[in-house]
Amino acid sequence: MTDEKMIKLVNKVNGLGGMTVNERLFACGLINEFDKVIKTDKEKAKRILELIQVDKNSIDNIISAY
């Protein structure tokens, strides 16, 4: 999935700040893409987390868990 397409998906969702990371991924339609890349493409996984407004410390913790 391209960066452009991911941005469009994220922009369709309001209120991300009140959601958990999994809720944000699901609401934006990115959960399957994230699951696909988390073990094989850490940079793309980080980009997805950035797009759904996850803070840097949490991103680092999530990525290092895999």
Image (cartoon, grey):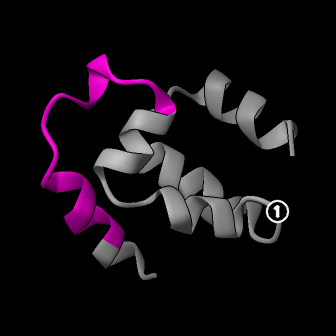
Looking at the image, how many numbered discs can be counted on the residues? 1
> Which one is nearer the viewer's eye here, 15 or 29?
29
- Residue 51 showing in the rendered view: yes
Predominant secondary structure in magenta? helix
Q: Is residue 50 above or below residue 36?
A: above
Which residues are the magenta region? 6-21
Name the residue rendered at 64%, 25% in the picture: 58
Q: Is residue 43 magenta?
A: no
Residue 53 falls left or right of residue 63: left
* Kind of residue sitting beneath label 1: Lys
**Closer to the camera, 46 or 65?**
65
Reply above or below: 54 against 8.
Answer: above
Residue 64 rendering spot, x and y as whole percentages: 85, 38
**Relative height, residue 61 to residue 18 (above, below):** below
- Give the percent coordinates (x, y) of residue 8: 20, 67
- Figure quadrant of residue 59: top right
